[in-house]
Image (cartoon, rainbow, N blue to C red):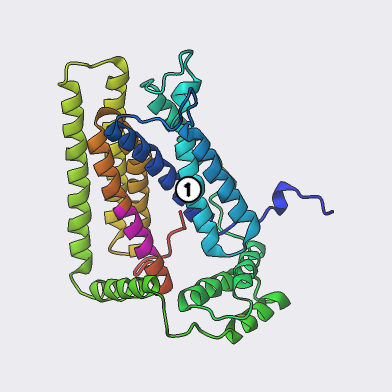
Amino acid sequence: MTKLGLGRLTRNTDAPWLIESFFVAAVASFLGIRWFLALTGYPQLGANGLHIAHMLWGGLLLIVAVLLLVAFLDRTVGYLAAVVAGLGFGTFIDEIGKFVTADNDYFYRPAVALVYAAFVIVFLVARAFVGQRQITQREAIANALHQLAAFANGPIEPDDRARISRLLALADPKAERTRLAREYLADLPSTAERRSIIENARERLAQGYETIMESPWADRALTIGVVGYAVLAVMGVGLVAIAARGSGSATDASTGSVVIQLGSTIAGAALIARGVISLPTSRTVAYRWFLRGTLVWILITQVFVFYSSQLAGLGGLVIDLVAYGSLRFAIIREMVAGRDQPRTVPAEAHP
């Protein structure tokens, strides 16, 4: 067996998207469970002295995710596994209060801060594994070959063909395996015209996006919409913080929650403002800054807003998840269309 050193590890080019999918699903499940339990009066599953804690369901979801990853090579299954694992992790860690208190207190209020700390630590470790370096030629061909494996005899969709072509463009052009991979990709038949309902819906969304983005007023309207969204987010969190402080039950924990709410909201808005600056030169770069700001709101702000107001936290999470999904879709469309490079200045490094 070949000895595996850290320098020989091959990074997955999908890893940043997979990590984001995992954490977005984790936060959504954590807040969703808290909201559902509060809405239904905290029911318990079990009888005769038995209680099946939902931590166990979280473990089951994590097992399902692992089985999906080890059983299938399909790229779509990888994304599904990331989401299922995120749902499992959020469900599992929701009961942390029971395991850090002597009386098994699920309602231990600092548990929210502990959950946030766990999210941040795991996120930073995951990002450290991926790194910020541009992929090497070896990693490019490895990822291209791995993704080609899912289309052993075709057919292949245009988006998948374009994505693999971009990877092969980063591989060693003189290598024989790169040439063979390009020929193999070129020989794969395109997908049939008949599409599923989901694929048809996605295609219509893509066409609608292209039509809107071709309009001369698209960037201006996008700027107004994004700025308005950021302003409303800051105002909304500010109102929640004021309501929490005015409830008469202020504690050191609630004060810290308010500070984090406001600080993270402003930080997210600053990242979005940075994206607005980049919009005239590159939509893709701007979208990535917007995505960073939205992730700050999802992974930090909404967790602590939920600490103050469950209704506001859940409503804000739903809105941010829609924005997050829309931005990911827009980034993919820009990359597929080859518009991921700045329009008037040298290319900015990938985040």
Residue 202 in which image quadrant: bottom left
Q: Who is closer to the viewer here, 299 or 335?
A: 299
Q: How many marks?
A: 1
Q: Measured from the top left, where is residue 203 in percent x and y?
A: 35, 75
What segment is highlighted magenta in the picture? 322-331
Helix or strand or loop: what does disc 1 sit on?
Answer: helix
Q: Measured from the top left, where is residue 125 in percent x and y?
A: 55, 39
Residue occupying the point 38% across, 21% down: 110
The answer to if 329 sits in the magenta stretch is yes
Residue at the spot of label 1: 22
Residue furthest to the right in view is: 1
Q: Amino acid at mark 1?
A: Phe
Q: In the displayed structure, would residue 250 be above or below residue 288?
A: above
Query: What type of secondary structure mainly makes up the magenta span?
Result: helix
The answer to if 308 sits in the magenta stretch is no
Q: Measured from the top left, where is residue 272 in percent x and y?
A: 29, 49
Q: Who is closer to the viewer here, 133 or 46?
A: 46
Q: Who is closer to the viewer here, 190 or 288?
A: 190
Residue occupying the point 62% across, 81% down: 153
Q: Who is closer to the viewer here, 44 or 312?
A: 44
Q: In the displayed structure, would residue 165 be above or below residue 79?
A: below
Residue occupying the point 23% across, 72% down: 212
Regarding residue 198, the answer to whether it shows in the image is: yes
Along the horizontal axis of the image, is 92 left or right of 7? left
Number of other residues with Cα within 10 Å of mark 1, as a class: few under 14, some 14 to 19, many 20 or more: many
Along the horizontal axis of the image, is 281 left or right of 115? left
Residue furthest to the top in view is: 102
Along the horizontal axis of the image, is 256 left or right of 243? right
Regarding residue 341, the answer to whether it shows in the image is: no
Residue occupying the point 20% across, 50% down: 229
Q: Measured from the top left, where is residue 27 in percent x and y?
A: 40, 41
Q: In the displayed structure, would residue 74 be above or below residue 175?
A: above
